[in-house]
Amino acid sequence: MDAFLTGVVAGYGIAIPVGAIAVLIVEVGIRCGFRCAFFAGAGAATADFIYAGLAVIGGAALAGLVSTIDRPLRIVSAVVLVIIAVMGLRRVGKKQESIEISYPDRSELAGTYARFVGLTIINPTTIVYFAAVIVGLGVANDMTAPQGALFALGAFLASLSWQTLLAGVGAFAGDRLSTRAQTVAVVVGNLVILAFAIVILVQ
């Protein structure tokens, strides 16, 4: 149980700080509704689960690997965020596309899930957290296989609960904001994502 609770703390530790992924999940909730945003959050939580598992299995080797690819990874992550933000701003700029709550089909939900798994996996904040903090502090040292599984499960459930809250916040706002207010929120969100990309590059 200690391993599970440690995983819960680790999961909240990476999920709660506001970053580009959190902003994107809220934006998806505003544009697409809770169901779509939930799948986005589930994708982010799945990536956290993967890294928690790697932290247990890989140990110090993972931290060493991350240090060798840190700069290229940051560049890729920043470029992806810039592309997402620019595309989001372009959608807002098209007058014929009003922002409405839509109900995507299963294939779109699967695509949203997969997209957020990928976005979170290449997010350097996620990688550095699990490699440098979890591994560096020795939290996952000497865990047995069952303890490691409980640690990763705890991290996943904690992350999922927070991402679900963000999805609900976005959907709640989308249901109650006027079309103009939704547009402003999406524009601000995409500008924040651009700011995160710049911060990633200059770090």
Image: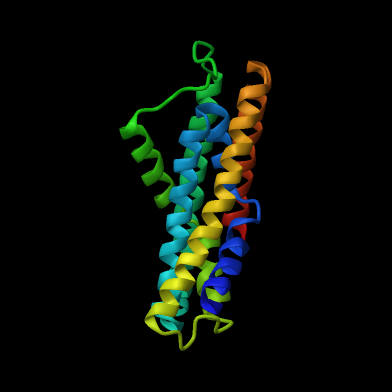
In the image, farthest residue toward the top = 96
- The residue positioned 56% from the left and 52% from the top of the image is 161
How is this picture coloured? Answer: rainbow
In the image, farthest residue toward the bottom = 142
Query: What percent of the width, then of the height, locates residue 116?
Result: 44, 47
Quarter of the image where one finds residue 178? top right
* Residue 172 located left or right of residue 157: right
User: Which image quadrant: the C terminus?
Assistant: bottom right
Q: Is residue 91 shown above or below 70?
A: above
In the image, farthest residue toward the left = 107
Number of dots carrying numbers: 0
Of 83 and 161, nearer the camera is 161
Res 65 visible: no
Q: Is residue 114 shown above or below 105?
A: below
- The residue positioned 53% from the left and 15% from the top of the image is 98
* Residue 69 located left or right of residue 33: left
- The residue positioned 61% from the left and 51% from the top of the image is 19
Query: What percent of the width, then of the height, locates residue 8?
Result: 57, 66
Quarter of the image where one finds residue 159? bottom right
Res 144 visible: yes
Query: What percent of the width, then of the height, locates residue 30?
Result: 58, 29
Of 69 and 186, nearer the camera is 186
Query: What percent of the width, then of the height, locates residue 162?
Result: 59, 51
In the image, farthest residue toward the front = 1
- The residue positioned 64% from the left and 56% from the top of the image is 16
